[in-house]
Amino acid sequence: MDDEWLQAGLSLPSRAAEAASAALFECGASSVWEDLPDRPGRAVLRSAFGTGDAMRLMTELPLAAERIAEAFGFGEGEVSVELEVKLLEDWDAAWRADQSPVRVSGRLTVAHSFWVGAVTCPGGGTGEDGGGSPPHHVLRMDPGAAFGSGRHPTTFLCLKLLSAAADEAEGLAADPSVGPPAAGAAGAAPSGNAPARVLDLGAGSGILAIAAARLFPGADVLGLDRDEDTVPVARRNAEANGASGSATFLAGTLDGPRGGFDLLLANLTLNPLLELARDLTLAASPGARLVLSGLLADQAEECARAYQRLGWHWLRHLGQAEWSALELAFPGWPGGTADGAEGGPDPARLLIPEPSLETPAPPDAPVL
């Protein structure tokens, strides 16, 4: 019937959420969104299809679930599939109702492009006219088929570190939710200077690059992604957020003469981050900062040590659920000989609570 649609879902351990999202799009989903998990450590992905896809999906979805389970080493029953018929009139309202703005920090909120309600900001204002100081930025994002809406922990943690870097560049006190840089690490003191050039490697929807362009208005920001289909999405988002003049998006990787970046961002997964360690190092300016995510908590130290052997120093280690994000500093010249620096001990993993929609994060976060 024309007034009905199919909702397909995958429930699985959250470390495979990105793979599940990709699998649903490969099956022909018109949209994919994350629902509340059925229990801690899990993710529930929902997607929309036409009712004519029912017979095909009854075969393709279980096969996709089997491939994910095999790739991630999940046991029997850890990945489940469901199909449900929904009324078309319920679809739009139900999906939009779950897309409330996400408060990242006192200076940054992410809202979906269609959000029409007020976005409250510190000081009682709204948007960039908020009464808070420094100015509060509201990013209006439409991720489309690209990864990066601000709701996944890896993106959220990167945005937290970006916001903290903006505070430090302005000489403001450290955001208590992320804590100060690790004591004793070379290059750990805030430079007091905003980055002039920013690289977002694996830009996806462009959310990190656009946030950097808004938080550091004088910076020249480059977003690179190997998937050329994401580039138009990122460019549209940049234009919608008034960042198209400072944020450039290209399909490609770090090959060729790209370097001299003061701030580098890479929200990928462990293996690509390890493979790209030398390329990212060569692309860095002296004193550069590096934000890495897409890492599970038990992968963070392996990743950090690989970069420390190239001269980077570990500054911060943030976590949310089982995910981690790292901030590192580069005190030397990127083309020089690796000094084998270990950069001090692993900073305690600072656990960031999941964001309350339109509500600032608690000022204190437990240290694990």
Image (cartoon, rainbow, N blue to C red):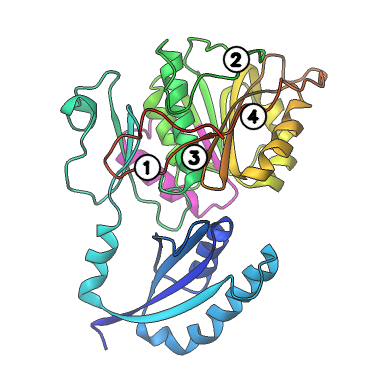
Looking at the image, residue 30 sits to the left or right of residue 147; the answer is: left
Residue tagged 2: 188
Q: How much space separates mark 3 and mark 2, taking CA atoms?
A: 30 Å
Residue at 20%, 74% (x, y): give it: 89
Q: Is residue 312 magenta?
A: no
Residue 347: numbered disc: none
The residue at 44%/32% (across/down) is 365
Dot 3: within a 10 Å radius of its alpha carbon, few (fewer than 14), some, or many (20 or more) residues? Answer: many
Q: Alpha-carbon distance for marks 3 and 1?
A: 28 Å
- Element under disc 4: loop
- Choose between 92 and 358: the one closer to the eye: 358
Give the residue at x 27% y 89%: 1
Image coordinates for residue 354, horizontal then vertical, percent: 41, 44
Mark 2 lies on a secondary structure that is loop
- Say which label, 1 or 4, has the lower sequence index: 4
The residue that mark 1 highlights is 355
Label 3 belongs to which residue? Answer: 249
Magenta residues, as a range? 222-247
The CA span between labels 1 and 4 is 35 Å
Most foreground residue, 249 or 16: 16
Measured Cα–Cα span from mark 4 to mark 2: 25 Å
- Left or right, 107 with respect to 206, comes to left
The quadrant in which the C terminus is found is: top right
Q: Amino acid at mark 2?
A: Ala
The percent coordinates of residue 26 (x first, y second) are: 53, 70
* SS at badge 1: loop
**224 is higher (above) or lower (below) than 67:** above
Q: Amino acid at mark 3?
A: Phe
| The magenta stretch spans residue 240 | yes
Q: Is residue 235 above or below residue 339?
A: below
